[in-house]
Amino acid sequence: MTDPGTVILLHGFFMRPITMLPVERALRKAGFDTASPPYRSRAHAFEQIVEDLLPALRGAGKGPVHFVTHSMGGLVARALIARARPAEMGKVVMLGPPHHGSEWVDLLAAARIGGAFFGPAEEVLSLRRPERVENLMGQPDYPLGIIAGDRPYGLPFISQRIMSGPHDGAVSVASTHLEGEDDHVVLPVSHSGMMWNRTVQGQIVHFLRHGKFARTS
């Protein structure tokens, strides 16, 4: 029987590995090994985050190494793979990744409070991401599936004023797209609620097994 491999889970900005626990449980039930390393999204520069995660990547078990990420974790995964691609590269599923930034970050930056709240992550999550940071991530040449949400949370009437088109309250659907993606699906979930949604969990497992999301029509 083929080893399904290990899934490295990377949480989002200002979060902890526990936020990925519902997804981790679904993956383990499906037969995958998992690792959910922490990283200091608000305290460390992007380059340092990648360096700090290298031991977790090198310590992955036998079989293909997959990634499942939320929000900023998707950007971290891109840079981590570009920095130290696993010998047996698996598939990648990203939940609400701000590949092209978030309007919220630039709004707070304009109010001169973005740096105080986001720390070094401000430049990573901005719509005007520096070329230095962009170059660290490269473009995907591995199976990539992206799940976006279109149900805002918190203060949707404010989100609608600063974000155009469908969005999950923090990241627009348009921003989640990335050249080279293999599949993309939009589900009725919020940015912070994605990991707890069973449909999202099922789609993650389906992509890791088949390289595409499940379609009902």
Image (spheres, grey):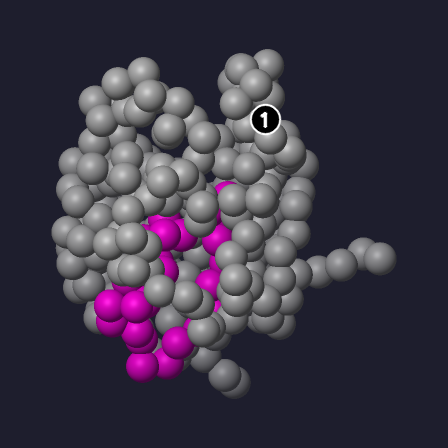
Please report the residue visible at 64 percent of the width from the left and 33 percent of the height from the top: 165
Callout 1: 10 Å neighbours few (<14), some, many (20+)? many
For the C terminus, give its image quadrant: bottom right
Question: Taking the image as drawn, is residue 184 in sight?
Answer: yes
Q: How many marks?
A: 1
Please check the rendered image and state whether residue 76 is part of the magenta-colored stretch, yes or no: yes
Foreground residue among 67 and 78: 78
**Residue 211 % position (x, y):** 59, 70
Please check the rendered image and state whether residue 92 is part of the magenta-colored stretch, yes or no: yes
Please report the residue visible at 52 percent of the width from the left and 85 percent of the height from the top: 1
Please report the residue visible at 48 percent of the width from the left and 53 percent of the height from the top: 94
Q: Secondary structure at mark 1?
A: loop
Left or right: 119 with respect to 191? left
Where on the picture, by quarter, is residue 80? bottom left
User: Which residue has dot 1 on it?
Assistant: 152
**Residue 157 % position (x, y):** 59, 14
Left or right: 57 with respect to 201? left
Foreground residue among 67 and 63: 67
Foreground residue among 102 and 71: 102
**Residue 68 % position (x, y):** 44, 56
Q: Which residues are magenta?
A: 73-97
Foreground residue among 150 and 3: 150
List the single residue furthest toward the bottom: 1
Please report the residue visible at 59 percent of the width from the left and 67 percent of the height from the top: 182
**Residue 63 % position (x, y):** 39, 79
Question: Taking the image as drawn, is residue 31 in sight?
Answer: no
Q: Is residue 13 above or below residue 53?
A: above
Left or right: 124 with respect to 150? left
Q: Amino acid at mark 1?
A: Pro
Q: Is residue 138 above or below residue 46?
A: below
